[in-house]
Image (cartoon, rainbow, N blue to C red):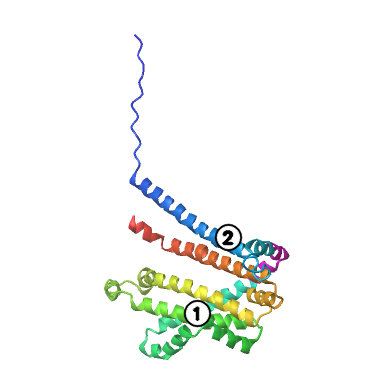
Amino acid sequence: MSTTLESPPKTPTRTSEEDIVRAAKRKDRITTWGWRLAGYVFFLGIWELASGNLMDERLLPGPSTVFTTFGRLWASGEVPGAFATTLTRIAIGFSLAFIIGIGIGILMQNRFLNGFFRDAVTVGVTTPGLIWALITAIIFGNRTAGPIIAIVLTTFAIITVNVSEGIKSIPKDLNDMAKSFDVSVVKRNRHIVIPHLAPFTFTAVRFGFSIAWKVTVLTEVFSASQGIGFEMRTATQLFRLDEFLTWILAFYFVALFLDKVVLESIERRFFSWRGELKS
């Protein structure tokens, strides 16, 4: 009598709730990116149709012409060189503005120093970047210090206001409790003050960085012998609209990359603990 070993019946695999949520997020991400790409295709298509049909191609070069011009400028080394100059100015100027803004924001917690800096910060917040670009262009000409000082004068106040408001909103009860348990100043700053100020600081950095981009290029348009703004001015003077639009699009793409990819990834990594708390 022969016996056969029967395999146990297979239990149907159940989809966990986590898999369902992950699939829903993936679908939502694909849909979002699909609509975003569709927007780019739509507007670029309208632009391409308008070039040569609604307007003379010399007045409105199409995307295909602009992309060809970009390849030529990149191969010649003009694009990397111009962006390296502009990004260096932004890095130096915004770093100085960040340090100055945080320092003044902390000092303004004192009642007397608040009165000392208050009007200067208000002027910095309300004054258009064009004013500082013109002033630095007149004073410094085409020297490197002009764009850097314009960045500092335009963005330090934004960082100051955010840091000052963040410090004011720190829960007093939490600080008092830490003091009552003899928590050291270093630990209080590390575990209470810095995490509380982080959202305000990141908001100031992203907003200030976007303004620093505009002010730098604007200053280079008025008074510079290198950089993106200088290349834009040269293209308009020579009536090379394909090159002018190329520099504008390159400026947009790099600004979007730095904001949406670099800064957002740093912010997401820094605040990853929020996702852990939600889960």
Residue wearing tag 1: 155
Q: Mainly helix, strand or loop, the magenta region? A: helix
What SS does tag 2 mark? helix
What residue would you read off at disc 2?
45
Labels 2 and 1: the sequence-earlier one: 2
The quarter of the picture where the N terminus appears is top left
Q: Residues within 10 Å of mark 2 (few under 14, many from 20)?
A: some
- Position above or below: 15 against 49: above
Spatial CA distance of label 2 from label 1 is 37 Å
Three-letter amino acid code of the residue under disc 2: Gly
* Residue 206 appears left or right of 77: left
**Image coords of residue 173 (percent x, y):** 26, 74
Instruction: Answer left or right for 6 relative to 214.
Output: left
User: Where in the figure is residue 272, as x and y percent of width and height?
Assistant: 41, 60
Q: Which picture quadrant has residue 248?
A: bottom right
Asked whether, in this view, residue 201 is left or right of residue 176, the answer is: right
* Along the line of sight, the residue nearer the viewer: 33 or 147: 33
Tell me whether circle 2 and circle 1 mark residues in contact (CB < 8 Å). no
Q: Residue 116: in sight, yes or no?
A: yes
Residue drawn at x 34%, y 34% is 12
Q: Secondary structure at mark 1?
A: helix
Give the residue displayed 40% in from the left and 89% down from the top: 113
Q: Position of residue 243 (x, y in %)?
A: 67, 69
What residue is drawn where x is 55% and y is 86%?
A: 131
Residue range in magenta is: 71-83
Residue at the extreme front? 54
Residue 217 percent location from the top left of the image: 60, 76
Identity of the residue drawn at 33% across and 46% down: 17
Q: Nearer the viewer's eye, disc 2 or disc 1?
A: 2
The type of residue carrying mark 1 is Thr
Q: Quadrant of residue 236?
A: bottom right
